[in-house]
Image (tube, grey):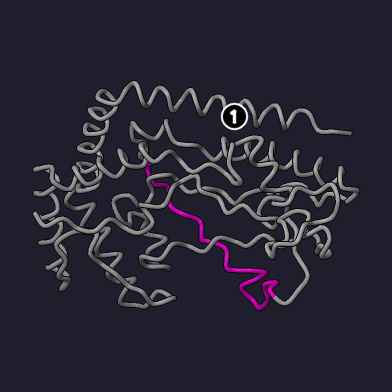
């Protein structure tokens, strides 16, 4: 079987978070580079999704969860506020509540949600934007993020800014931690091996035959590509046929079962390094919790 390329979104670290003042502390900034236009404030909310079974894979428990990320964010946020007060500046508001996270493996085997596909095709539903609660002046903005031009911020502010300096105290780096490279490598390996599983190969052949009955010529569910910004009628029609053929052939269920077995084997063979990752994560979260419980007054 010719290997299909991995979806681009599949390769992104699940826990990688853009560390900036707007995300961490819910604030805007003044200046010509501030966002503007309709997309900067409101986007269409995603439609309610029909109930889809959440498919949890064995390796999932080793990844940072949304709850873990919230704990890290809170700990860093408390340290940032302390840093700002130490420089004689008023801290910005606390963290914005993150939007609801979709299930981790929602798109691992392609589109499966007919309600979403009917409106958005293969595109992800847009996430409602978070409206900034406060606009910062230049002094507070530079204290948060640093100056980035070689000049030092005001006295009492770390050269790299309060956000990066605070993150180092929790994560050991100037930002949020990505999931470890070896864990992401195993996650990709299990997916690639699943594409070569004989049962999955046969299931994809049945799915492809089903799609041909609807006048679509695709060998695997990873092939459809619609780069337009908005879903077209043809894209929506293709996505709905894709889902119908998955259901008719049982492809997603057998694919999930095959990869579950592959991941269990990988865990057995890499137990020591995965246990070490869990120990490191526990220490990271303990540092975040200590920071979050002990704000300066």
Q: Position of residue 245 (x, y in %)?
A: 20, 58
Q: Is residue 252 above or below residue 171?
A: below
Q: Position of residue 129 (x, y in %)?
A: 63, 62
Which residues fall within the magenta stretch?
33-53
- The residue under the point 40% across, 66% down is 123
Which residue is denoted by mark 1 in the rendering? 285
- The quarter holding residue 223 reads bottom left
Residue 278, magenta (yes or no)? no
Under circle 1, the secondary element is helix
Image quarter (top left, top right, bottom left or bottom right) of the N terminus: bottom left
- The quarter holding residue 147 reads bottom right
Nearer-the-camera pick, 176 or 104: 176
For the stretch drawn in magenta, what is the main secondary structure? loop
Q: Position of residue 71 (x, y in %)?
A: 63, 35
Image quarter (top left, top right, bottom left or bottom right) of the C terminus: top right
Q: Position of residue 96 (x, y in %)?
A: 70, 50
Q: Is residue 220 above or below residue 280?
A: below
Q: Is residue 14 left or right of residue 237?
A: right
């Amino acid at each position: 079987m010719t290997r299909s390329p991995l979806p681009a979104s599949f390769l992104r670290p699940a826990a990688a978070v853009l560390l900036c003042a707007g995300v961490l502390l819910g604030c805007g900034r003044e200046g010509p580079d501030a966002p503007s236009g309709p997309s900067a404030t409101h986007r269409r909310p995603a439609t309610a999704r029909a109930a889809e079974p959440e498919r949890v894979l064995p390796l999932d428990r080793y990844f940072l969860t949304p709850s873990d990320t919230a704990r890290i964010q809170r700990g860093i946020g408390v340290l940032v506020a302390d840093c700002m007060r130490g420089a004689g500046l008023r801290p910005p508001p606390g963290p914005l509540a993150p939007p609801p996270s979709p299930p981790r493996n929602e798109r691992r085997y392609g589109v499966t949600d007919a309600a979403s596909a009917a409106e958005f095709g293969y595109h992800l539903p847009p996430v409602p934007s978070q409206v900034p609660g406060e606009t910062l002046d230049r002094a507070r903005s530079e204290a948060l993020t640093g100056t980035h031009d070689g000049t030092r911020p005001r006295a009492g502010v770390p050269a790299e800014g309060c956000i990066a300096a605070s993150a180092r105290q929790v994560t050991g780096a100037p930002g949020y931690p990505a999931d470890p490279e070896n864990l992401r490598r195993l996650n990709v390996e299990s997916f690639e091996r699943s594409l070569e599983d004989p049962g999955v190969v046969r299931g994809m052949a049945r799915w492809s035959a089903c799609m041909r009955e609807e006048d679509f010529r695709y060998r695997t569910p990873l092939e459809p590509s619609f780069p337009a910004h908005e879903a077209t009628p043809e894209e929506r029609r293709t996505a709905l046929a894709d889902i119908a053929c998955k259901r008719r052939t049982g492809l997603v269920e057998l694919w999930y079962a095959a990869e579950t077995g592959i991941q269990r084997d990988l865990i057995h063979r890499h137990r020591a390094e995965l246990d070490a990752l869990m120990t490191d994560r526990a220490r990271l979260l303990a540092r975040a919790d200590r920071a979050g419980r002990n704000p300066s007054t």
